[in-house]
Image (cartoon, grey):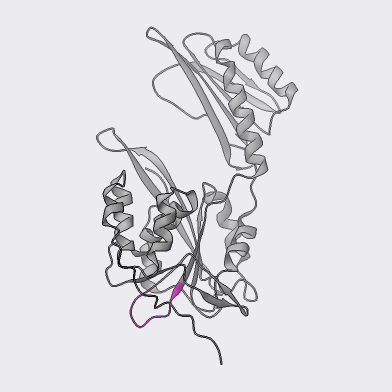
């Protein structure tokens, strides 16, 4: 006899109100309210207390899926049968009478290429002392720089003045007048993600700055999707949430990976990312963007209410 997935664990008696009171922002407070009616909530509460990145990402994704809808049932880390063994998705949601939708959340680390790009950009902004007063130097590499590239940029910076443009096969250097407005010059010709680092100084009222941008590659979207899908049973709707700044670059990889013969347990993937943007009054606010990619070949589609909620997320900042 097939074993049923039991998501009816008794709710703990300990309230989460005291945890919500010490939350340091309103978004966290809203997220924690979702846990008040969740089966197995104590599992996530303990990890949220420790401020682990994985736990905070799961809590964020849960709040995006549920919102203020009191009619949605929630189970945290339910034990389910997958391919003959026990697995533990991060959470599951449903409305009464529906099948559970199982959700896995992951926030991948940087790729090796991204680590190299960050190290190069961070090192090069230390060239700020070589930048003349009153100018802003913009350096965009076309690949991860070599030692020779760095030497060439240093030589070009030493001779640069406002209006200088140096366009070479490995990098582009543009020098403009420094102002209080930060502008980004040029995009990667191969449409890769770019890591940027910036430094500046003030001498009285005179500004100077340097911005260094280095491209990198990260093609892991499909592999990460497959790894997370192992926690999701074949028979119900399944959603993979990827917290990443590579949504633009991973979208095509993931959409092309959906097939009539494989990955059919995945009903959809949500690419989401949070960042600080300016509000109307000039104060910073945290905004989340997201794009849900629906698998047209899935065995079970996402429920309409969940798909529509996720499709309502802003797809870009601003």
Compared to residue 298, the image places residue 106 above or below, namely: above
Q: 185 or 249: nearer the eye?
A: 249
- Please say if 269 is above or below 115: below
Image spot of residue 131 (x, y percent)? 55, 12
Q: Quadrant of residue 214?
A: top right
Where residue 70 appears, as percent x and y from the top left, is 27, 69
Residue at 58 percent of width and 15 percent of height: 164
Would you identify the image quadrant in which residue 126 lies? Answer: top right
Image quarter of the N terminus: bottom right
| 10 relative position to 116: left or right | left
How many discs appear? 0
Camera-side residue of 177 and 107: 107
Q: Is most of the magenta stretch helix, strand or loop?
A: loop
In this view, which residue lies farthest toward the front?
Answer: 14
Q: Which residue is drawn at 38% across and 64% down?
A: 41
Q: Residue at x 43, y 47 (%)?
A: 51
**Residue 100 on the magenta span:** yes
The percent coordinates of residue 253 (x first, y second) are 61, 57
Q: Does the rendering let one see residue 115?
A: yes
Above or below: residue 119 compared with residue 57: above
Q: Nearer the viewer, residue 84 or 209?
A: 84
Q: Is 75 included in the stretch rendered in magenta?
A: no
Q: Say if residue 290 shows up in the picture.
A: no
- Residue 178 lies left or right of residue 265; in this view the side is left
Give the extent of the magenta segment.
94-101
Which quadrant holds the C terminus? top left
């Amino acid at each position: 006899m097939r074993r049923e997935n039991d998501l009816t664990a008794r709710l703990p008696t300990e309230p989460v109100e005291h945890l919500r009171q010490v939350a340091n922002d309103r978004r966290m407070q809203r997220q924690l309210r979702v846990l008040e009616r969740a089966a197995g909530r104590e599992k996530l509460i303990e990890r949220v207390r420790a401020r682990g990145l994985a736990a905070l990402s799961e809590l964020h994704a849960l709040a995006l899926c549920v919102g203020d809808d009191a009619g949605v049932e929630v189970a945290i880390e339910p034990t389910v049968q997958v391919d003959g063994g026990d697995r533990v998705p991060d959470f599951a949601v449903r409305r009464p009478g529906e099948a559970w939708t199982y959700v896995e959340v992951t926030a991948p680390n940087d790729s090796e290429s991204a680590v190299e790009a960050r190290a190069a950009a961070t090192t090069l902004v230390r060239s700020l002392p070589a930048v003349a007063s009153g100018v802003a130097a913009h350096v965009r590499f076309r690949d991860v720089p070599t030692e020779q590239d760095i030497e060439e940029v240093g030589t070009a910076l030493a001779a640069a003045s406002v209006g200088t443009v140096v366009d070479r096969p490995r990098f582009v250097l543009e020098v403009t007048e420094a102002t209080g407005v930060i502008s980004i010059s040029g995009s990667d010709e191969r449409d890769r993600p770019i890591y940027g680092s910036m430094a500046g100084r003030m001498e009285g009222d005179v500004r100077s700055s340097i911005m260094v941008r280095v491209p990198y590659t990260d093609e892991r979207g499909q592999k990460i999707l497959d790894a997370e899908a192992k926690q999701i049973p074949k028979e119900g709707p399944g959603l993979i949430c990827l917290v990443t700044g590579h949504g633009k670059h991973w979208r095509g990889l993931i959409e092309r990976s959906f097939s009539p013969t494989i990955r059919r347990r995945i009903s959809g993937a949500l690419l989401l990312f949070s960042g600080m943007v300016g509000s109307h009054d000039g104060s910073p606010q945290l905004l989340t963007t997201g794009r849900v990619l629906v698998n047209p070949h899935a065995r079970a589609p996402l429920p309409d209410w969940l798909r529509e909620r996720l499709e309502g997320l802003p797809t870009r900042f601003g």
